[in-house]
Image (cartoon, rainbow, N blue to C red):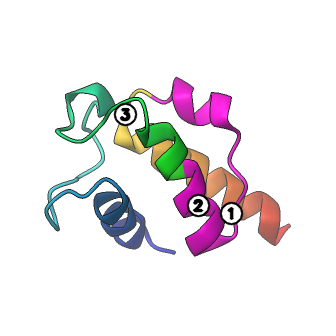
Amino acid sequence: MTRQDALRLLEKTLELAPHTLTGGETLRNLENWDSLSTMMIIAMADKELGLPLPGNRVAQCQTVDELLALLANASAKRAA
């Protein structure tokens, strides 16, 4: 999955307009980021990508780039 694919998937999961995320955004400043967003991200990663993400790690993410890094790390571990 490319970075752009991951950004589009996050936009879809968070119900944001397409092509609005670039990676540097602070999660708490996103329009649809709320207390349920962590669960939505975990469910999306499992359903769409088959990747288990620890809830505490998702909750610790402060930026979109940190979420992307978490997804990339989980994907790399699965491939190894």
Which numbered circle lies on residue 45?
2
What secondary structure is marked by label 3? loop
Q: Where is residue 68 in the image (x, y as percent from the top left)?
A: 47, 50
Nearest the eye: 22 or 44: 44
> What is the magenta segment's predominant secondary structure?
helix
State which tag comes first along the sequence, 1 or 2: 2
| Residue identified by numbered label 3 | 63
- Horizontal side of residue 29 vs 45, given as left or right: left
Nearest the eye: 58 or 43: 43
State the separation of the CA atoms marked 3 and 1: 19 Å
Q: Is residue 60 above or below residue 22?
A: above
Q: Mark 2 is on which residue type?
A: Ala
State which tag comes first along the sequence, 2 or 3: 2
Residue at image x 53%, y 43%?
Answer: 39
Q: Position of residue 18 (x, y in %)?
A: 17, 68
Q: Mark 3 is on which residue type?
A: Thr
- Residues tagged 2 and 3 counted as in contact (Cβ below 8 A): no
What secondary structure is marked by label 1? helix
Nearest the eye: 39 or 62: 39
Mark 2 packing: few (<14 Cα in 10 Å), some, or many (20+)? Answer: many
